[in-house]
Image (cartoon, grey):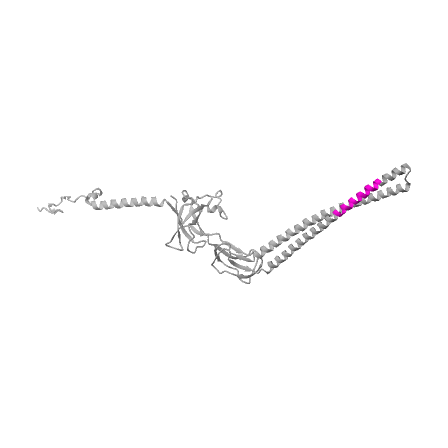
Amino acid sequence: MDTRTKTGRDGSESPEGSYTNTARPRPSLLSFPKRHPYVTTLIALLAVLVVAGAIGWWLYERQYESTDDAFIDARTVTISAEIAGRISDVDVTDNQPVRAGDVLLRIDDSVPAAAVRQAEAAVSAAQADIGNVAAQSQAQNAKVNQAQRQVDQARAALDFARAENRRSQELLSKGTGTQQQAQQATSTLQQDQAAYDSAQASVEAARSQITVLAAQAKSAEARLQQARAGLDQARIDLSHATIAAPAGGRATNISAARGAYAQPGQVLMMFVPDAVWIKANFKETQLASMKPGQPVDIEIDAYPGRTFHGRVDSIQAGSGTAFSLLPAENATGNFVKIVQRVPVKIVFDRPPDVLLGPGMSVVPTVQVR
């Protein structure tokens, strides 16, 4: 009877039907460091470096807060006409840099110039009225003095007439005087009394005229003040015929044209001052350690590869939505909490040597620690 054998992996034979398991056991992961010490060391070193790098990155990044929701901002000025008139000249072109006080445009000043001359004439007339009233007052004072002297004369005559009348009456009573003399003395006394009363009335009338002239003087002074106010207004209107730059900057979006008729309040151009800053809308969760004075690194999209420096100027007292045209009303309807953004004003340490304008994108990074 044949006996079949089976050759194992090690070359030994065994009878057919019987199996001998001579396979090596699979090595465990715990034995890997022993079998590959250099690889294990390299992996451990890389892990340490990764953990150390992650910790260093976290420690570094926690010192900074950054946002890409930031833009260049400025207080743009609307240049508009303050008087009506035809535009005689436009002295600037689009985006032209100008200095404070440079002329931007001129409006025909013939009408306001005529108004100035008319107001000057009104001032002169008012001053003449004041002088006239002053002369009349001086003359009236002389009349009062003259009337007062007449009163003094009438009083002296009256006193003499009273004494004469008293003597005539005494002589008549003693029989040494005549009735005619007594009547004549009485008549003279009555006439002198009437003259004295008339002189006093003349003084009162002259004095009352002084009061009238004083009122006229006040009225003339008021007219003078009114005329001067009109002259000031006319001069202001004349000055508005020339529109100058309120600060250093650039004229832009010019709609004014020579020969066009300008109405008061009509927008003629926009003016962008040189003084610009950054309006950065940080999340409210980024503001815990942010405060004015902290340094800021500024990257401007228009100038890649360059970093500008500035500082935090102020933090708005409220989120942006609180000051919007239609602020959110969370007390109505369903409420979903959304992280709000708060505008932060960032100013440059030095005026940038590049062209910047409102709306340009910026990425500021604030060092908060």
> Considering depth in this image, is 198 or 249 the residue closer to the camera?
198
Quadrant for residue 304, please give it.
bottom left
Residue 55: image x %, image y %? 32, 44
Label the magenta part by its dominant secondary structure: helix
Residue 70: image x %, image y %? 42, 50
Q: Which residues are magenta?
A: 145-163
> Considering depth in this image, is 255 or 311 the residue closer to the camera?
311
Look at 35% across and 46% down and name the residue there: 61
Quadrant where the C terminus is found in the figure: top left
* Residue at the far bottom in the pictured view: 259
> Considering depth in this image, is 19 or 260 the residue closer to the camera?
260
> Considering depth in this image, is 69 or 223 the residue closer to the camera?
223
Residue 264: image x %, image y %? 57, 56
Q: How many marks?
A: 0
* Residue at the far front in the pictured view: 176
Q: Is residue 141 above or below residue 172?
A: below
